[in-house]
Image: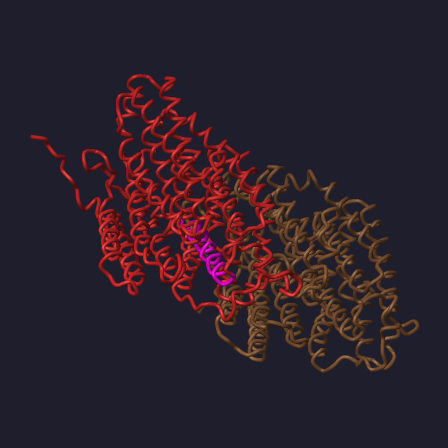
Chain colours: A red, B brown
């Protein structure tokens, strides 16, 4: 008789809700008549995400003392729950814009897209709570495979297929690196649980063990691919450009949230003795990301590519918070992710609206006049751009302040200076977007012919951009409540 | 609502009004009227505040403090000192005139325009009343956002290059200030400007000063100034040189000098030299400018130098004079740029080569330009004279040659200002000055006359400001005691 572990179903409720609704959406692909399929699947996805938010908020409230559940394979704590709230929020916003923006209106496979979206969200929700290397790898593959397909879902467009394939190849490389690293760590410590690894390293005096360090390095590289930090970022611009824009929006915000929050958890709970190594490694990665992201973004004309590089540079800013390895840094990271996810998502959603209007890729040239034509989206976009640049229009400003403060507290004033210089460089291209939207009269330019007629009304896209705007501006005023949440979440990590 | 919430009201009323303007689909006329009304309301609130202000008492008045985020000891803390009261007054008065100007000339896309102008008002007042470093920084940066768009959308043909320069210059300074304030705030354990103890760190001082000398600007950090002042719409230039530039000199007084006494005296000679250089260089360039806006722009550079000379002289006379001069020059350059805009509307240019003879048959233009010009060249009896005299007397106490340089520059001021006045008003009639070009209309008079009136009142009673800026009328003690 095989003994089965006790399963705390409530701890998994967010994942189960998302997975259940994914299954429901998939059933809809077969059972619901074609004309209602899109609405049905989108409604299921939205409802599933809202359900996920509800359960994860509940979990947050109910998991004040963090512990591991399901054969010590999953953390039930506030760090997981808070990450799940952000992820489900992103999934909800994605479902809203995907209703209007994925594929052609009559596409009969549209329900599968929503099923994949929910599956990916579920995978990420599991990923952020992973408590051993096995669940970590499984959940990583779980959401990655869903994302590979989502990137290629626009299968009649070459760019989308290319993006899917590229992400698959590079992503598999990252996964393989992570898996191999995990094997090395297991080899060195004979454990896969994060807490056990730390204990075993402490007991056996393994902190300089070559296998362990090599394994850690490969795990860092594998996670670096997921959070698209330099030098593991090569796939990012191509994939972000080629993937359907709602998918890009989801990847830019959700994948990054999941990757960064999990990385912090793994490093803090499994490798605290190696802090002197990974701290410097991530500081290096942060600097590289800031340099590559900001400098490359300067010369981009394609807005999706520009935002892709901007997301690389923001990975750099957030990694500053991660690399210092303190509770303040973890709070900074958690806080930063909230406005970042909102702004990242919102800006891609706006690109999606323009893309649909023009029927072609959005560049800085054909963005001309957009701000005056669609006032709400224009204003939202300049809020996001100024917010990204760290001007006090949104929480991005406080986020930067927090990560810099964390770096200074750690004694890394040089990293503050690097961050400040990077911010200054980034201004140029963020303002470039604002300039393109507002300051160039369309007649001065060779403007792409608009597909004709008034732009689509897109109420759901407006709603999700409005949500993103509210979150990014609100986080500037509600710093204290958010920091309190982050503080409680951080308290479940071993600092 | 208590009296102390007036300060917050001054900040948030225009920002709230900006949101209303952006959200509601009001007509052009309604938008402009609402903006003007709110600007006048600001002036009214400020007058009420000034009337209740206790000039004899030291310390912060009308202060309000609330939590923002506690774990790094950052709070929402606003309040006013004597000198900040005057600068807030300058802001609301100048902004009201500029908003009125925008309404009068009928700026395109009124909802965006007036919303941004009001947002700018709120942010600028915020800079002058913020008593928390991060809050100060937030407002300092927030001023840039509307400015960037106002110049970039409503500016002249070279606006693109101008905006990029403006933003990159000022942000370079601001971001260094961000680094400096993080280091300072975490080191002393609070970001509250009132509570924070003084520091002797020269690096932090330089970080702050870098932002302020770019904003003011001082030579050689003025690279953004000429293009921006030429390309921006006249009322925005007026705000920039009249009010925004004062945020730089205010920062020097409130933060750099008050919180860093040791570095201040260490770098005193260097900064005084930069200030003197700005004064002389600006005056020479103003004399060489071929257009009216150029003259006023470079004279603003010179005046920033003069104000910095007063502030860093470290004497009571110099500090009193600097505050008086900040307000006086703010009013002067606001009126001059608005007048330049009005001349441009009539002659399509502000190049002296194409202007001249405007005075004939246009008594209002002639009188107002002449009056402001005369005040600005610091004729004895004018507010600017009082300010400059105090500054020079203060600088003289530091060392006689600073005063000598300053006095020389004032002679230059007389030369460039008289040249500008005669280039526009007198001499042979310019090729672009047509007989049909009208004199100032009632609407325009309603904008400039009050400004000139305030200026004349200040000329009659400069002590109103110079004796009422620091607690117990003892500037050096107030600075040494960090205004507590």
Name the spot of residue A174 as percent of width and height, x first.
40, 33
Would you say residue B189 is visible in this rendering?
no
Where does the magenta region start and end? A338-358
Residue B93 within the magenta-colored segment of the rendering: no
Name the spot of residue B215 as percent of width and height, x first.
66, 52
Q: Residue at x 45, y 67 (%)?
A: A456
Q: Residue at x 43, y 25 (%)?
A: A277
Residue A354 within the magenta-colored segment of the rendering: yes
Q: Is A62 or B219 nearer to us in this picture?
A: A62
Name the spot of residue B356 as percent of width and height, x first.
88, 71
Instruction: Check the image and name the residue furthest to the right.
Output: B428
Q: Is B263 or B203 nearer to us in this picture?
A: B203
- B424 w.r.t. A94: above or below: below
Q: Residue at x 42, y 66 (%)?
A: A458
Q: Is A283 or B450 nearer to us in this picture?
A: A283
- Figure quadrant of residue A213: top left
Left or right, A59 with reference to B334: left
The quarter of the rendered structure image containing the N terminus of chain A is: top left
Would you say residue B222 is visible in this rendering?
yes
The quarter of the rendered structure image containing the C terminus of chain A is: top left
């Amino acid at each position: 008789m095989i003994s089965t572990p006790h399963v705390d179903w409530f701890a998994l409720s967010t994942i189960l809700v998302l997975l259940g609704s994914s299954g429901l959406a998939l059933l809809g692909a077969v059972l619901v008549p074609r004309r209602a399929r899109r609405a049905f699947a989108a409604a299921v996805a939205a409802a599933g995400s809202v359900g996920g938010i509800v359960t994860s908020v509940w979990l947050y409230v109910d998991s004040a003392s963090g512990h591991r559940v399901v054969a010590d394979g999953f953390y039930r704590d506030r760090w997981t729950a808070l990450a799940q709230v952000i992820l489900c929020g992103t999934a909800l916003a994605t479902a809203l814009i995907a209703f209007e923006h994925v594929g052609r209106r009559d596409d009969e496979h549209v329900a599968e897209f929503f099923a994949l979206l929910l599956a990916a969200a579920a995978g990420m929700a599991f990923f952020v709570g992973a408590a051993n290397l096995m669940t970590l790898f499984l959940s990583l593959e779980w959401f990655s495979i869903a994302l590979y397909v989502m990137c290629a879902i626009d299968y009649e467009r070459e760019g989308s297929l290319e993006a899917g394939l590229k992400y698959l190849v590079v992503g598999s490389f990252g996964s393989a690196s992570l898996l191999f690293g995990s094997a090395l760590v297991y080899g060195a410590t004979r454990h896969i649980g994060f807490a056990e690894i730390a204990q075993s390293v402490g007991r056996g005096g393994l902190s300089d063990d070559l296998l362990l360090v090599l394994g850690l390095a490969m795990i860092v590289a594998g996670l670096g691919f997921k959070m698209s930090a330099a030098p593991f970022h090569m796939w990012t611009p191509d994939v972000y450009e080629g993937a359907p824009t709602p998918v890009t929006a989801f990847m830019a915000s959700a994948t990054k949230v999941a990757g960064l929050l999990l990385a912090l958890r793994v490093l803090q709970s499994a490798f605290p003795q190696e802090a002197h190594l990974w701290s410097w490694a991530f500081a290096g990665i942060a600097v590289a990301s800031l340099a590559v992201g900001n400098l490359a973004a300067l010369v981009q004309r394609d807005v999706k590519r520009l935002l892709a590089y901007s997301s690389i540079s923001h990975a750099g800013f957030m990694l500053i918070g991660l690399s210092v390895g303190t509770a303040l840094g973890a709070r900074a990271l958690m806080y930063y992710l909230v406005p970042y996810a909102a702004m990242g998502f919102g800006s891609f959603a706006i690109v999606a609206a323009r893309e649909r209007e023009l029927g072609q890729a959005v560049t800085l040239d054909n963005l001309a006049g957009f701000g005056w034509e669609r006032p709400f989206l224009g204003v939202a976009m300049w809020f996001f751009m100024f917010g990204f640049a760290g001007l006090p229009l949104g929480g991005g400003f406080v986020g930067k302040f927090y990560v810099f403060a964390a770096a200074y507290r750690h004694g890394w004033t040089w990293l503050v200076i690097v961050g400040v210089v990077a911010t200054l460089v980034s201004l140029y291209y963020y303002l470039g977007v604002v300039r393109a939207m507002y300051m160039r009269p369309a007649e001065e330019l060779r403007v792409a012919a608009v597909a004709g007629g008034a732009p689509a009304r897109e109420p759901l896209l407006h709603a999700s951009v409005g949500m993103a705007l509210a979150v990014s501006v609100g986080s500037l005023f509600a710093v204290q409540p958010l920091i309190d949440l982050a503080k409680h979440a951080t308290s479940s990590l071993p600092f | 609502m208590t009296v102390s919430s007036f300060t917050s009201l001054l900040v948030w009323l225009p920002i709230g009004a900006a949101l209303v303007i952006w959200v509601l689909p009001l007509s052009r006329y309604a938008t402009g009227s609402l903006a003007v009304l709110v600007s006048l309301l600001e002036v009214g609130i400020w007058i009420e505040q000034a009337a209740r202000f206790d000039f004899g008492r030291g310390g912060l008045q009308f202060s309000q403090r609330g939590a923002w985020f506690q774990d790094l000891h950052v709070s929402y803390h606003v309040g006013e000192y004597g000198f900040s009261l005057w600068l807030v007054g300058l802001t609301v008065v100048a902004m009201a005139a500029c908003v009125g100007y925008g309404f009068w000339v009928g700026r395109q896309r009124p909802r965006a325009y007036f919303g941004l102008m009001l947002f700018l008002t709120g942010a600028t007042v915020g800079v002058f009343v913020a008593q928390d470093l991060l809050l100060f920084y937030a407002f300092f940066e927030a001023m840039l956002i509307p400015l960037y768009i106002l110049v970039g959308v409503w500016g002249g043909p070279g606006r693109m290059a101008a905006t990029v320069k403006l933003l990159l210059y000022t942000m370079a300074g601001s971001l260094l200030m961000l680094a400096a304030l993080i280091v300072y705030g975490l080191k002393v354990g609070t970001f509250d400007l009132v509570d924070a103890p003084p520091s002797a760190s020269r690096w932090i001082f330089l970080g702050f000063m870098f932002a302020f000398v770019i904003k003011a600007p001082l030579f050689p950090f003025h690279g953004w100034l000429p293009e921006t002042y030429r390309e921006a719409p006249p009322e925005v230039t007026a705000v920039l040189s009249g009010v925004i530039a004062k945020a730089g000199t205010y920062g020097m007084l409130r933060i750099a000098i008050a919180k860093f006494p040791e570095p201040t005296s260490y770098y005193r000679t260097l900064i005084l030299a930069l200030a003197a250089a700005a004064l002389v260089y600006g005056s020479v360039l103003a004399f060489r400018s071929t257009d009216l806006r150029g003259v006023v722009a470079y004279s603003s550079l010179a005046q920033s130098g003069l104000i910095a000379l007063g502030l860093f002289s470290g004497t009571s006379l110099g500090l009193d004079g600097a505050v008086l001069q900040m307000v006086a020059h703010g009013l002067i350059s606001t009126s001059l740029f608005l007048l330049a805009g009005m001349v441009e509307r009539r002659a399509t240019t502000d190049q002296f080569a194409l202007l001249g003879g405007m005075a004939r048959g246009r008594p209002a233009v002639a009188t107002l330009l002449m009056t402001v010009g005369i005040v600005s060249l610091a004729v004895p009896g004018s507010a600017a004279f009082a300010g400059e005299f105090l500054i020079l007397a203060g600088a003289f106490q530091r060392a006689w040659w600073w005063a000598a340089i300053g006095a020389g520059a004032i002679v230059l001021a007389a030369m460039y200002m008289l040249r500008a006045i005669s280039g526009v008003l007198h001499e042979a009639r310019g090729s672009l000055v047509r007989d049909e070009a009208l004199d100032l209309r009632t609407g325009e008079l309603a904008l400039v006359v009050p400004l000139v009136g305030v200026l004349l009142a200040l000329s009659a009673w400069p002590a109103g400001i110079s004796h009422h800026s620091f607690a117990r009328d003892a500037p050096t003690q107030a600075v040494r005691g960090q205004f507590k």
